[in-house]
Amino acid sequence: MAKAQPKPTTDAPDAGAPAGDQGAPTELQALATAGAPPAAGNPPAEAPPAKVERRAVRVLAAVTIADVRYQPGVLIEGIPMDLAEAHAGSVDAHPDAVAYARSTNAQVLQFEPERDLE
């Protein structure tokens, strides 16, 4: 049985490459620059602001959302979906529930995002 030849290490220079070759970046150089900020002439592109999905909800039970108290039967238009989902026990965003509220001439209130930021 023949003995296995030891694998060449990456520390030794490649026999085919001239010593001191700086043309191709090494794996170590790539890792070192991976977290580096981009060059001043190439600032990173900013991601566009995420589009907030808004919809109308029917209030099922008295609830306070963004410091505003809403009574049952009221229709809130323009509420962000994350708030509607957070108050799912008190509001119903299903299109049938919203259509029912409209058919009963429920009071329609606009959600005011400025109050949400305060």
Image: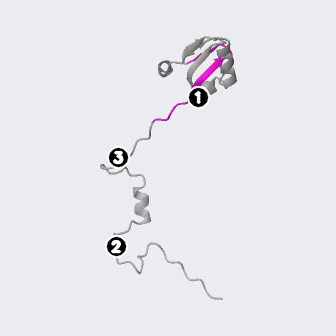
Q: Answer with mark 2 or mark 3, whichever residue precedes in sequence.
A: 2
- The answer to which image quadrant residue 86 occupies is top right
> According to the image, what is the colour scheme of the structure?
one colour
Mark 1: amino acid:
Asp
Where is mark 1, residue-wise?
82
Give the alpha-carbon distance from disc 2 to disc 1, as whole Å: 55 Å
Q: Is residue 118 visible?
A: no
Q: Are marks 2 and 3 in contact (CB under 8 Å)?
A: no
Placement of 115 over or under 31, stated as above or below: above
Give the alpha-carbon distance from disc 2 to disc 3, as whole Å: 30 Å
Give the side of residue 43 with respect to residue 28, left or right: left
Where is mark 2, residue-wise?
21
Q: Answer with mark 2 or mark 1, whichever residue precedes in sequence.
A: 2
Callout 3: helix, strand or loop? loop
Image location of residue 117, percent across then percent down:
48, 22
Callout 2: helix, strand or loop? loop
Please state which of the two labelled residues, at mark 2 or mark 1, is closer to the viewer: 1
Give the side of residue 51 with respect to residue 69, left or right: left
Quadrant where the image shows the N terminus: bottom right
The magenta region covers 49-65
